[in-house]
Each structure stands twice: as structure tokens, then as C-alpha cells.
Image (cartoon, helix red, strand yellow):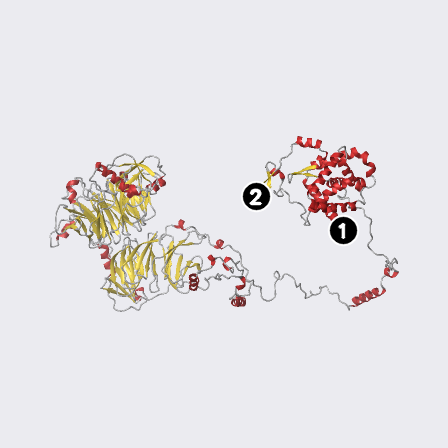
Amino acid sequence: MDIDGNDGASEEPSRQVQVRFVTKLKLQYKAQPASIAIPANATRFRLSNIVNNLIQKGNEDWEPEPFDFLIDGELVRMSLEEFLLAKGISIEKVLEIEYIKAVAPRKEEEPSLHDDWVSAVDGSNDGKAELVVLSYRYILTGCYDSFGRIWRAVGTCTHVLEGHSGPVTSVCICSPKGESVMDQTVATASKDRTVRLWKFDAEESLNQPKKIRAFKILRGHNAAVQSIGSEPSGAMVCSGSWDCTINLWDASASDNEGDIVSVKKRKKGGEHQEPQSEGEALSTFVGHTQCVSSVVWPERGTIYSASWDHSIRRWDVATGKDSQSIFCGKVVNCLDIGGESSALIAAGCSDPILRIWDPRKPGTLSPIYQFSSHNSWISSIKWHNKSWFHLVSASYDGKVMLWDLRTAWPLAVIDTHTEKVLCADWWKNDSVVSGGADSNLCISSGISVQ
Amino acid sequence: MKQRKQNEFKNGKDKAKVQKLKSKLEEETLRRIAEAAAAEESSDDSTFVSVSEDDDDESLSEDGSSISESGSEQSKLSNDEDVDQASESDNPSSGSDDDDDHQSGDSVRDRDDNDNYHGEDKHGESDDSREVVEESDSSEDEVAPRNTIGDVPLEWYKDEEHIGYDLAGKKIKKKERQSKLDSFLASVDDSKNWRKIIDEYNDEEVELTKEETKLVRRLLKGKAPHADFDPHAPYIDWFDWDGAKHPLSNAPEPKRRFIPSKWESKKVLRLVRAIREGRIKLDDKPNEKARLYDLWHDSSSSGRQGLAYIPAPRRKVGGHEESYRPSAEYIPTQEEINSYQLLFEEDRPKVIPKEYTSLRSVPAYSKAVQEMFDRCLDLYLCPRVRKNRINIDPESLKPKLPSRKDLKPYPTTCYLEYKGHTGPVMTISTEPTGQWIASGSKDGTVRIWEVETGRCLRVWDLGESIDEVAWNPLPELPIFAVAAGHDVFILNTGCGNNEEDKKIEELLHVEPQKAMDDSDTTASIVNWGQDDKHGGIRLKHFKQKLVKKLEAGVREISSIAIHPGGDNVIVGSRDGKLCWFDMDLSSRPYRVLRCHPKDITRVACHRSYPLFASCSDDSTAYIFHGMVYSDLNQNPLIVPLEILRGHSTTDGRGVLDCKFHPRQPWLFTAGADSLIKLYCH
């Protein structure tokens, strides 16, 4: 059966493998399910050609598209023959190959230039009503020039968050999902030991970036705040700091706690300013012995934190005790929770290895995955929102890498940055945003994670 | 004469034949002959007794010959003779000769032989003579054996149909063997059949001649094989006794030979007297050894006088390339020969292979004189003191050190660089929490860096080359001191919050002093001044005061680091030596580590990890494991762990400073290449 038209002529007599292509993609991607014989030395590219040809048979106006192939839940990254040999799969049987869309950025957007190093980025405002909010999705960045910025799209900065006196170290969007785009709340942490909360209207269309001030300043840390995370509902934020503590803050704008003391000071200034309130920490988690480099609040009851004391801890919010700790022997720089049922811990340490733990696994506390394609410290890690398998990691070697748990090789390497990459995040589920020491915010779009 | 010679030949040949027979013929055959002979002898004894009596030697042979012709088959015998005759007449040319010889041989024999047996003898002789003619003068008197299998047991070819191969490579087939019945019948039919023997080796039937049967018989009786040989010949005394006049003396011994000598006893008396009188002293000591020595004694074993023998170095056995006519692959091309010129003299091949048509044309060795001179020079210059080498396994001398893997963590890889300085970075200092580092450079700037990202936070330009930067170890007061030129600056880092800033401001504000106080208080040795430009204090004219004297065994001390325990001091010196002092142990260094080829610029101790480091102008930094045990009996354990490279040498200076991160097993190094590097585990 000669499906592969152009390859048929030049095909040397090699071993054949009986395969059947299956997919979980939408109907238009479906190919005929008959089993065909293909040469065993076919690589990913050739397999992709074959599948495109197969789909074109059923659908004339089909645009060829790169695919990735899964055999037994593992991505094929070498020739089929080698893969089968390595995995010890018999080629006697009809092989079932699942194909998925290849995950790689199709387009590199123009970088958005900042005034200084981009230290933090967050693009996680995925509202519920996707169609409505889609155009109002924004990117929040923190910069070493002590400003936070809101970016509507590539190169269009809508808001500048003014107020910090030190470099912004971490940002997070803490609007509860489904809330209107009119009233977005974001939080920023800075080296000036404060956490600030900001409100803005994402719907505003502005020619000039609008400068806004924080509506709430959260003081309480004795050293630079290194990381910030918000509760899924957006009602609270937590922050990790160089003073080895994790503080919990109330993120709501309610003024009934009566912290208007500071407001009058601000009003002394000539121009009228929005009232600013100050907040105290609701509670403090003490336990880390060194700088808390990263905090994540994936669900209401638990906070995960990573620290320079080589540990990753899980905190119970209600009791303030750490219920689990993982020691990895190295300084942990970044942390994210996600993956399978949002339970896997991905962390980047002070070495080029990306480690993933499964805390549900009893007994051992060794990582279940280790990816080591980076050349320097990993500065940021983010799980994909929808997919269980996909990760993005940024490293000081200037590279952003896309990972799939089903293969040990990176899916894609984005090296648009010329300097250290300090932060990276997913945006709109199909793009990767990253900021680095070259003061650029790079957006790589067109990543089709299903 | 010729006949005699022939006889001798025959004798020798017979012997050889016997040998051959002995070896070749089966035992059974012999027995058969013996039996047959015995039987016939016994049967015919009566008939021939009278004849065989006179000569023992002859009788047997005659018996043998008589046996053959005994019995009733006279006619058959004559037939045989006829056949023989016929065969002889078949080749007339040689036949006449044969006959001549034959006749003459007979004539000689006839002296002893009885006329009775003449005819028989003649028959036997005819056989013999034919053989005589056939045999050659060579020692290989035999016809080459038909069998070519060589000296191997015949059993090996028992089941084969051939016995070896001929020259053409074809198999030599075995002859068909007579069945036993046939042979039996043949023996019954033919009275001579018993003489036929199968030669297993050559696979042919041999008919023994009468002579041969005689031989066999004689052998069986234990007599000399040939009848001609006389074992009992009379003794001939070859010595001529006629001229012997003086036979040996038979006189008795004289008396004087049994009497003690008078003169001897006199002499003994004289000696005894002399000893008694003391004229002769008996010396107990043996005489000195004669200065004689064994000329042919193996001199190498005993101590030699003079120069010690130094054997010439053993040369490698020459290979093909040293041949006067090596194969083509050994001969280098012109290019290769030219390339030898580029090599060092020591690396060049000793011999360049070259082809000569003959050994005759090989020229004299051109370097012979040179090499001989070199050898003489070597011998002349080489030290003559024999050093006894001790055979010690060098591995066993190595101290037993724990594996590096077990001593983790320690810094290994450089992950971060702090770029910004424009001159060599002279000094670095870490903030106590490890969030910041301060660095001072020769370009006159002091910078504060964020450890985590390598971001430069703040820059002070002091205008003078910075010698030293030190962060306040108290985390509440984020200030640091800078030594630049003759001044010390204490600067506010600006890393604190407002309250701290206020405190620092108060602290750093001093009243301007008018003049130096001459009293002995501590304040007197510094001159405080407000430094308005940078917002800090300026200390002027810092006087040195000796607190304690340390004894180090090195030339010039460049840096000191104190172990956090306090009892151990590490000293780095300008001659590349690193000394570990254990204060409890002694004032001398406990260990001296010679690792850097150039000056050690700085040594550092980690605050919490058992690590110490040294950095040097050879642009490397060494990491050591230095474990101090609380048990006083146990000496500190020092293990070299890692050499950190990465800095480049600029103006002859390498790494100028190294500091450990206060909390992590990381090392900061400041290089003359204006970089600061962070090495992480």
C-alpha cells in the first residue's frame, strides 16, 4: 500500500512495520484507521509526512502540519526502528501510533522593550468566558526599574504600576476567575520589602500607558520579598522573603480594617491620589532557614514553597505547619505545581537540571523526572494550564525550553533572548512569554498544546 | 679379493637384513620357521646325522639347505632350478657375469663345502650373487620400501585400502591378501611355501632364501649370524717380549726405611730448645693473607676497587626499520624526513631507514664517534655514588583520603558571572545573609551585586583603587567598610528599610574632629571625618598595632583565614604554599599544601561547611575539604577537592580574591579580568 507517494520511488528495501495511526484530535485531523506498512527507519518528519498524506486523502484542502507521535505514551524522538529497539517493542504486531500536534512555537513576536531587566512575568489571567475576555487578556511584568507593567498585546503597554522603591521581584494576577475585566487585581513584590496590590481596568483602551498606584501596601517582611503567589480565588496572597518567612496577606480591597492612617500622608502631596491602605500579614509561616525563593498557592488549603535552604515544603494554610518537605541538596530557585491532577512539583535548582517530584508517591523522595538540557540555573518553571505534560522553563543560559513529560528531550528551544532569562510563563494557553536581563519581553506564539 | 670384499658386503648386508627381519617380520612367522625347522630337523636327523657331525657351523646351514631339498620332491626341485636358470638366461648380458662371479665364489667356498651340496649351494649362491649385483655402494642398500607411510604403527592403516602415496600423489593400493584357507592349501601343495612370509610393512610376499633361513636359525640358536665369523679364534700376543732385559725388582725394603731419622730428631730438639728459651715465639695470629687474588673470580659480585662499573643502557633490539634493506613501508618519504627536522632532537627517530642494495654497500655508522664520545662523557660526568633504591609502592605512600563524592557539597561549576567592573576586581565581601555581595575594583568603584541574578545594584566611585571591602557582619546594619588608598570608608549600602537607614545615618554621623588626640585611647589612632560626598565616615591615618605574632615557615604571607572553630588558621603565602596551622598542635604548620605555582592571593574558610579555598595568580582557585573534629585526638582532615578555573590572567594577575557564600557551599572569585564568578555545587 503506497500511501507515501513521493517516498515510494526512492524507498530502499528496508524493514517494514505495520502501523495504525490514531488520534484524539478533532475530526478534521482524523486519518483513515486502516493499518499500513511503513519503513522501520522512518523518522518523525517522515511519519508526519505520511499522516499528512493520509489526511489529505480524506480532505482535499488540507494544509500539511507537523505532528508528534506517541507510542505507548512516549514521544518518538528517534527513528521508529531505534525507538522500538530501545523500548523493546515487537514489530511483529500492528503498532498503534497516536499522533498529536507538534508543540513548538510557530511565530516569534517582536520583543517588548522594558527600561530595565524584566524580573517577573505573569500571563495567567485566563477568564472563564473565554470568547469575551480573549481580547482583554494581558501580561503583567515586573521590572528592575521598580515598575510593574500591564501589556495588552505585543508592544502595547497599557498600565504602569508605580510605587515600589526597589526592583520588582515577583508579580501575580490575583483576580478571581470569571470576574469582570473591569476590575482586575494584581500583586507585586519588591526588594523594598513590600508587597503591593493594584487594581486596574483591563478594558480601557489607552494611547499612553496609564500610571496607577497601589491600592494596598503590605508591609511586614524584614527583607526583600522574593516571591508572591495568590490564592486561586484571589482573596489572599502569600509572599516569600529573604527573611525566611512566608506571609499571608488579605488581598481584598475592603477598607473596613481601618488602615487609612497612611492615606493622609499621601494626600499631603499636591496632586490628588487614590487612597492607599496598608495591610498587616494575616499569618506568618516560619520554618525555612533561608531565603524563600518561590511560593505557589495552587489550591485553597495548601501553599508550596521553595527555599535556598534546599527544601521544598508544603504548608497547610489552616494550621500554618509544613506537612511535607522535600530536600534536594541544592538551592531551589523556582517552583510550580501542576501536571497530573495538579499534584506534581516541578522545581529548578542551582544547577541546570529541571526536576519533577511526585509527592503522592510514598517512600522515596527522589525526583520522578530529571531534564537536563539547560546549561545554567533554571530561573523559572511553569506548568501548562490545561495540559498535564507540558512545561516551560527559563534559564540563565538565555534559553526558554518547552518540555513534555513523555520525552526526555525538549520539545522546543526558544533562544530569542540574548541574556539571562529571568522569568517565563504561558499566555493564552498557546504562547510563551519570557523576560530577561536583555530587558526584553519575548512572546512566542502559536504553540498548539491541545 | 673382490670375492672377499663381496663376502664382507654380504655379511654386513645379512646383518642388516636380519635386523630388518627382526623388526619387520612378525613373531609368528619366526615361530613358524622355527617350528618347521625343528620339525624337519627332528624328522631328518637320522638321515643327515653323519653328514652334519664334522662341522657344527656348517651343519646347520647344510641342514637348512638339506631341509629344503629333502623329501620326495626331487623333481620339483630340479624344476625350480630350471626355472632359475631360465630366468637367468632371460637376460643374457648380465647373466654371463653373474655366472662368472658365481663360479668364482663357488670355487672359494668349495674349500669348506661338501661336494654333496654343491648344486644346492650353487642355487643359493645364484640368488645371493644376483643380490650382490643389485646392491649399490651406498649405505642405503635396500630398495626403497614400497610403503610410504613412514614410521607409524601399521594398525593405523589396517582398515585402509592403501598404504601411503607414491610420488605422483596416487594411493599405493594394498595387494589382495590370500585367505587363510588358500595359504593353508598352498602350504600343503608347496613344500617351499613355509619360506614365504608376508611383509606386512611393504605388503608383499617375501620368499626367504636359504641363506636367510640359515641366518634365522643361527640367530635362534644364539650363534653369530654368519657362519664365517669365528668367535673362538686363537689369541695373538702382539707384544714382542724378546728384547726385555730388566724385569721388575724383587729386592726387599732396606732397614733404614724403618728407622726414625737422627737428623730430624736433632732438629726437633733444637726447635724445642729454642722455644723453651724463648728464641722462637709461637704467634697465635694466623699470618696475614697473601695478597693474591683469583684472577678469574667473578668480580661483579664483590666490591670493586676504583670506579663502579656502570653498564651501558640496554638497547632495543633492532626491528625491520634498522635492516639494511627494509621493506618499502618502513622507508620514510622525503616529506616525512623533512618533517623530522621540525621535531626536537630528542623526538627524532634514531635511525632513518634507508635501502642499500647489499650489506657491502652499507656505510660506516656516522654517529659512532659521537656516540662513543657521549658515552664517555656520560661516564665521566655521572655520579659514582651508589644509591640503594628502596622498592616502595608509591600508591601505598598516598594518604588514605575519603572520596570526593562523599564530601559533597562543594563548589564545582561556575554558573554566574558578575560583569560591570572595568578594572581588576581586588576584593569582594558577602552580606551575612548571602543576598548581596560587595566588590571593590582597581577602577576605583565599589559595587553591590545581587547574588541570585548577577545584577549590579549600586555603584560608588571612590576614585582610588579599592584594596578591601568588608560587609558589616551584623545583618541589622547593612553598612560596609571600604579601604581605598590610605583611607577607610564606611558606607551605607542602602539595602535596609527606612528605620535602618535612619539608624545608619545616626551611626555614621560624626562631629568633625579638629586634630589628632595624642592620648593612648583607641580613638586616638584614627581620625574620623564626615565624608559628605558619599554619605559615610572617613577614617584617616590608621595606625597598625601588633597584637600577636605568628610563626610561619613560608617566605611571605599574603593572606590569613581563620577557621570558624577558632583553633585553626590557614595561611597563604606568596610562594604558592598553603599552611594549615593547628593552634592546639604546635606553632608549626600542621600541613603545608603546595598546590599553586604562583602567589596565593587569598585564602578563605567557609562559615558552616567544612570547606576552605585558596586562590592564586595562576587564575585558579582550589577548594579543600578541611574537617576539624571536636575530638582533640583526631587531627584535622584535609582533602583537596576541586580546581576551579575560568578566570583569565591579566597583567600577570589571576584570581585576586575569593569568598565563600555565607550559607551555601558556593565560592565567589574576583579576577583580574574584572569579572566576579560564582561557583556553585
Q: Name the side, left or right, on which B376 lies relative to A407.
A: right
Secondary structure of residue under mark 2:
loop
Mark 1 vs mark 2: give the one in front.
1
Residue count near mark 2 (Cα–Cα under 10 Å), binned few <14, some 14–19, many ≥20: few
Residue B224 x %, y %:
76, 44
Q: Quadrant of residue B657?
A: bottom left
Q: Are marks 1 and 2 on the same chain?
A: yes
Residue count near mark 1 (Cα–Cα under 10 Å), binned few <14, some 14–19, many ≥20: few
Residue A3 visible, this orientation: yes
Q: Residue at x 23, y 59 (%)?
A: B505
Q: Nearer the viewer, residue A305 or B209?
A: B209
Residue A338 visible, this orientation: no
Q: Name the side, left or right, on which A450 lies relative to B360.
A: left
Which residue position is annotated with label 2? Answer: B169
Residue A377 x %, y %:
30, 50
The residue type indicated by label 1 comes to: Met
Chain to which the residue tagged by mark 1 belongs: B
Residue B536 x %, y %:
25, 62
Q: Nearer the viewer, residue B377 or A143?
A: B377
| Vertical comparison of A194 with A5: above or below | below
The residue type indicated by label 2 comes to: Gly
Residue B675 x %, y %:
30, 59
Q: Earlier in the sequence, mark 1 or mark 2?
A: 1
Secondary structure of residue under mark 1:
loop
Instruction: Estimate the spatial distance between the alpha carbons at disc 1 and disc 2, rounded to whole Å.
Output: 45 Å
| Vertical comparison of A92 with B647: above or below | above
| Vertical comparison of B347 with A391: above or below | below
Which residue position is annotated with label 1? Answer: B1
The label on residue A318 is: none
Total numbered labels: 2
